[in-house]
Image (tube, grey):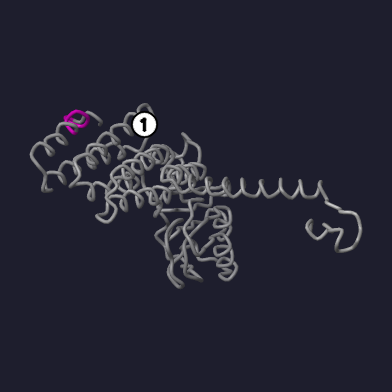
Amino acid sequence: MVLRAVRAPEDTGAEVVVPNLSVAVAVLLGIAAILAIVAFIDHNAHTMEVSEVLNRVLTEALAATPEADDGRAEGAGSIADPPGTEGYLVRCERDGWVQHLDVAGMLGAVGDRGTVRLETGVGQFVFAGSPLCTLWPIPPDRRRAEGCVHAAVRVGNSRTVHGDPAYGIRQLVDVALIALSSGVNDATTARDAVLHAAALLTRLVATPPRRAHRDECGRVLLVPHAPTPADLVALTFGEVRRSAAPLPDVSVQLLETMHMVCRALEGRRLDPAVRPAIHEQARLVVAGVEQADLLPADASRVRRVYKRYFADGAEL
């Protein structure tokens, strides 16, 4: 548009007109565009760095984790098992991942002092027609009860960390497993991923998902399929230690990370199965190393680290 305003004297016989201000602005905008492209490329390059990806997953998962609640365990433990009478089974309407659960909406499917037991959990995949929940007593208006349940449970096409922060551990562990695969063989990335997963684990075991909810009307929602703290420990370390058995440096780092988790959890009110679960994973690290084809010096190094941190129940 600027160049169209330039006229030469031989074309029109008029005086030369050069839009100096417009040309200057165009040049500045061109320079700005080049700088913006360079900044965009630099931003993308840093965004795709492994550390940035791991930190982003950790941040999103921590944001989806509830704050610590000292009454959480007592509230769940005081709720009895579902009634022994026959209940009404509600089934899923579609295939997909359970992304969100509205507790109040679920409890709205039963009357006062009624009970709802979720037959799946947030973060699990369901099939159309598979059991979704069971209601006690059998509701008089079954269609209305089913409508309340289906409106309270959101099923989507992908799994998310919202309402399912354990998915963050799953993503971080997957990065470690890919890094340890024979095609990649990147032990540094694997160690970085394990550290991020352990950081998330320390938060999740301190604020485990509630396995039961009770409202002011005496209605109870049971969530038996929520992951236990011991499940989270196994998810964090189980698959990685199996892949790391032939790599003594990664196995040592796994033991040191487990020790760091135990130190970070000192003084907190935890599920009593947490520390024994960590100790068992540490023992299995050593057992895997002993079964691997390693030099005696490498296997001895892993055993020494284990004895330093976990021998004689040091972390129990």
| Quadrant placement of the N terminus | bottom right
Residue 262 placement: quadrant = top left
In front of the other: 108 or 59? 59
Nearest the viewer among 209 and 18 is 18
- Considering every residue shown, the one lying at the far front of the view is 10
The residue at 41%/46% (across/down) is: 50
Residue 313: image location, x then y, percent: 20, 31
Q: Residue furthest top?
A: 267
Q: Position of 216 compared to 86: left or right?
A: right
In the rendered image, residue 307 lying in the magenta stretch gets the answer yes
Magenta highlight on residue 103: no
Magenta stretch bounds? 306-312
Relative depth, front residue between 223 and 19 = 19
- Where does residue 85 sit, x and y in percent of width and height? 42, 62
Residue at mark 1: 265
Q: Residues within 10 Å of mark 1 (few under 14, many from 20)?
A: some
Q: Secondary structure at mark 1?
A: loop
Location of residue 14 with respect to 252 vertically, above or below: below
Q: Considering the whole magenta stretch, tell me its main secondary structure.
A: helix
Mark 1 belongs to which amino acid? Leu
Q: Residue at x 44, y 56 (%)?
A: 123
The extreme left residue here reads: 296
* Residue 234 in the image, given as x and y percentages of width and height: 30, 47
Task: Kindly give the residue lying farthest to the bottom in the view shown.
Answer: 129
